[in-house]
Amino acid sequence: YTSKKPQMAALHTVIERELQQVALKRLYLEENGKRYGRLIGESMEMKHVYEQISRLAQTGFSALINGESGTGKELVAHEIHNRSDRAGEPFVAVDSGAVPSGLFESELFGHERGAFTGATGRHRGRMELVGAGTLFLDEIANLPLEAQAKLLRVLEERLYYRLGGEEPLPLKARLIVATNRKLEQEVTAGRFRQDLYYRLAGIQIDLPPLRERRKDIALIAGYFLQKFRGEGSANIHGFSTAALRVLEAYHWPGNVRELRNVVEQSMIYAHGPLIEEHDIHLRPLSSPNAGLFMDLLHRPYDQAKEALTTQFKAEYLRALLLRHQGNITAAARESGIARSSLHRMLAELGLRGC
């Protein structure tokens, strides 16, 4: 017969340690939120983004934000606006891909009564409504070439006209644009104007995908957990170590947006106080490395080969560590890699074992 008291004491210790980690993460998120709003991360990649935001906010220059879907490009634009001297002015966002090509000029510049069939009155466009604030054009690569030409003319002259209007209106707003495509490739393919690209690409912020900043995954998951706890799941306080390993090993093709959905769904399955490994349901809709392979096709062969090899090593070792719960000795035994070599490879890739 074995007493259950020691087991309960051990369980209490584990839960207490996990809750302490949750408290530390909550403190970090509160402090980080005072500085960078809803942008979360302490990785070197995100620290570089924060530095760029701080510098850019002090200028009035236009900016181009590059990043995959779901990485938080609009949040970056918001932070630039909120830290600038335009913070008291409007922030207006336009999804360039959601506006029909024939209506883009009216949406952006506005129109006068009678400018076209159905124009029964004056319509103020986004450029007019934003005033001296910040105009954010998301997915700029979706703009038709004709609209690109008109946008370039406005940026160069700092003046625009409502459709059907004769009165020039000054462009007072700052323009920030974003794209999930490689604009250089769009220019080469003839889908994006080279002159507009050079006009927009003077200052760029490259937002890293979540798979390239895995150090931030636990923090971001903790942020969403705290957010959703206020919506009816107050009995869930954190993630188990095994659950965090699952989150950190996944490739996140949908980036932060996908992580948000996974955390929300996991809280439905969990019975608390911790989200466990079996509560996490991952349903990738695309190849884990589709974005990587598309990028490799446009690189020199040697660079592409090196990048692919590095990615393979990282994915292989993450899966290996996950299977052995971070145990280096067991991982080395299964893989046939010497323990010292495995330690070195993990250090080079920034992965952790135990």
Image (spheres, rainbow, N blue to C red):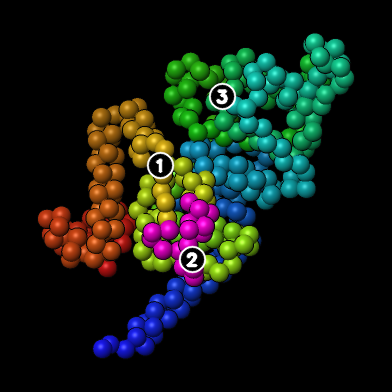
Query: Is tag 2's residue or tag 1's residue first in the polypeptide sequence?
Result: 2
Magenta residues span 262-279
**Chief secondary structure of the magenta portion:** helix
Judge whether 36 appears above or below 193 on screen: below
Camera-side residue of 200 and 345:
345
CA separation, marks 2 and 1?
24 Å
Residue at horizontal 29%, vertical 58%?
Answer: 322
Query: Is tag 2's residue or tag 3's residue first in the polypeptide sequence?
Result: 3
Judge whether 81 appears above or below 154 on screen: below
Residue 317 placement, left or right of 215: left
Q: Which residue is at the far front?
A: 1
Q: Is residue 140 magenta?
A: no
Residue at horizontal 49%, vertical 27%?
Answer: 183
Closer to the eye: label 1 or 3: 1
Residue type pointed to by label 3: Asn
Secondary structure state at the residue bearing disc 1: loop
CA separation, marks 1 and 3?
25 Å
The label shown at residue 271 is 2
Quadrant for residue 280, please give it: bottom left
Residue at horizontal 64%, vertical 18%?
Answer: 101
The residue carrying pointer 1 sits among few (fewer than 14), some (14 to 19) or many (20 or more) residues within 10 Å by Cα, namely few
The residue carrying pointer 3 sits among few (fewer than 14), some (14 to 19) or many (20 or more) residues within 10 Å by Cα, namely some
Secondary structure state at the residue bearing disc 2: loop
Q: Are marks 2 and 3 in contact (CB under 8 Å)?
A: no
Q: Quick one: quadrant of the C terminus?
A: bottom left
The label shown at residue 284 is 1
The residue carrying pointer 2 sits among few (fewer than 14), some (14 to 19) or many (20 or more) residues within 10 Å by Cα, namely some
The label shown at residue 142 is 3
Secondary structure state at the residue bearing disc 3: helix
Residue at horizontal 53%, vertical 54%?
Answer: 264
